Amino acid sequence: MKLDIIIPAYNEEKNVSLIHDKIDEALKDIDYNLIYVNDGSTDNTYRELKELYKKDKKVKVVNFSRNFGKEAAIYAGLEKSTGDLCALIDADLEQNPKYLKEMYNILTKDEDTDEVAMINTKRTNNTYAQKKGSRSFYKLINALSDIEFKADASDFRMFTKDVRNAILKLSEKNRFTKGIFSYVGFNVKYIPYEVEKRSHGKSKFNFKSSFKYAIDGIIGYSVKPLKMATILGFIASILSFIYLLYIIIKTLILGIDTPGFATLASLILFMGGIELICIGILGEYLSKTFIETKNRPIYIENKSLGFDEDVL
Ligand code: UDP
Ligand code: MG
């Protein structure tokens, strides 16, 4: 079976040839192609990839016109893939290519498995706060969403072309790969592995981008926050109505009270806060809808290498 290995790379000039050699070593007797996706790198990644392309005919390069993000890079790689099997692996060697062989063996021997996903249960490279944050994220998203999100499952996966075609059918612009994998289903086998140290360069994900990623995941896979806003509105109105009745009855019995400025001020601020939160939630969904309706391409290519012969 022919395997396509998709490698998203953003500013990975020192890693792209290292991972090429490691994969070469690990997959000696397997028929495979490497699809590098250069996600608008600003360093010498493209030049390095060009050298690799000249040296090795297994190498193909999708070159983006600018940085579109890892999710877009994965989509582009899948779109270009023509093999029976596809694998995703990061360029930074945190994910050891030796596992590709393991995944390949499972998929080729066991017909009932459509996908093998590596899970990083130990999260060796993460700080305590990152581990806690990711636990809370999975708890929250599993409580809010109808589909199940497997904790600690990475993008380090291999799957059949049926899975690939299913993923490509989800052509949304806000791509949240973890969600997409959960959404399409199929028979997935999870295998634990240990993440290694990044070989060169530094990670592109920080606290801010991880937080945005988490919000994107929740908005993309659950409408429960909208329902919660409605419920919150109902509760607030019921409580205010009860309070109103209380004031009317009190006035009828005891006459007009001295003005309660503090009560009034705190009520207005409290209700104003709830309203703004609800409008904010609505705005999040609206902004995602706005982006989807513009229907812009997920990525734009510029001087990709090695795909021309496939057109003929
Ligand atoms: N990546 C990408 N586009 C981006 C950010 C990252 O293609 O905008 C690639 C990056 O080159 C690497 C993989 O995605 O191959 C994972 O990125 P990184 O190592 O920064 O993330 P982490 O491992 O820290 O989650
Ligand atoms: Mg990494």
Image (cartoon, rainbow, N blue to C red):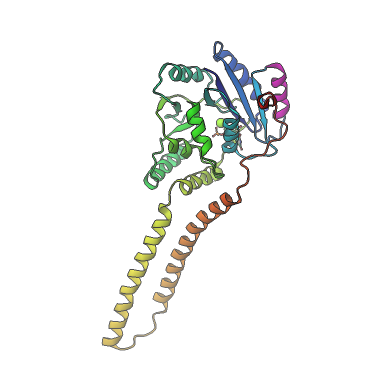
Residue at the far front: name it.
312
Residue 92 visible within the image = no
Report the number of numbered marks.
Answer: 0
Q: Residue at x 40, y 45 (%)?
A: 145
Q: Residue at x 47, y 24 (%)?
A: 194
- In the picture, residue 17 is in which quadrant? top right
Residue 99 in the image: state x and y as whole percent: 49, 20
Q: Position of residue 259 (x, y in %)?
A: 39, 83
Q: In the image, is 79 to the left or to the right of 54?
A: left
Q: Position of residue 195 (x, y in %)?
A: 49, 26
Residue 213 lies, with reference to residue 51, above or below; the image says below
Vertical position of residue 292 compared to residue 39: above or below? below
Q: Which residues are magenta?
A: 45-56
- Residue 250 found in image quarter: bottom left
- Write down which quadrant ligand 2 falls in: top right
In the depicted view, which residue is nearer to us: 131 or 111? 111
Query: Residue pushed farthest bottom?
Result: 255
Residue at the image position 67 percent from the left and 17 percent from the top = 57
Query: Viewed as shown, does residue 115 lie left or right of 71?
Result: left
The answer to whether 183 is drawn above or below residue 235 in the figure is above
Q: Nearer the viewer, residue 65 or 236?
A: 65
Please tell me which residue lies in front, 266 or 109: 109
